[in-house]
Amino acid sequence: RVCASCRVQEMKNERTAFTESKDTVVEKSDSEMHGHLGLHDGLPQGKEFPVVPPDGQIWVNSKLSKTRKKQVVKHERLENYLMRTRHMSYKKAHAIAEKWEKR
């Protein structure tokens, strides 16, 4: 069992880890993105994600506004972080990132 103050500190450390990610953000055209708003290198390549960025990159759709691009990058970083560190499925990490976006 973890004490409440320890958990709060752990959450702060996690927040720092994914918000200060060193991933390079690259803008791509809508056709290159296959209709997605953002993609990160931890996604499972396949039918849903025919193209996945190389390691260390997050791709964001160039048609988005500057504000929306920032939101998408944060979403992708959190999703990637959860998949890598918590070994979550894409579906679960995506749902958490969506909830976090709406707060």
Image (cartoon, rainbow, N blue to C red):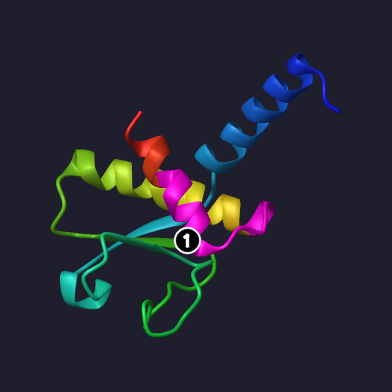
Magenta stretch containing residue 40, yes or no?
A: no
Q: Is residue 37 left or right of residue 52?
A: left
Q: Secondary structure at mark 1?
A: helix
Name the residue tied to disc 1.
91
Which part of the image, by quadrant, shows the C terminus?
top left
Quadrant where the N terminus sits is top right
68 relative to 21 in the view: left or right: left
Q: What residue is rendered at 13% in x and 58% in y?
A: 63
* Residue range of the region highlighted in magenta in the rendering: 84-97
Point 37% across, 45% down: residue:
98
Q: Image quarter for residue 3? A: top right
| Above or below: residue 19 compared with residue 46 | above
- Residue placed at 31% from the left, 41% from the top? 71
- The answer to whether residue 42 is above or below residue 67 is below
Along the viewing direction, whichever of 49 and 23 lies nearer the viewer: 49
Is 98 on the left or on the right of 68, as rendered? Answer: right
Q: Local crowd at mark 1 within 10 Å, few (<14), some, or many (≥20)?
A: few
Rendering coords of residue 99 (x, y %): 39, 39
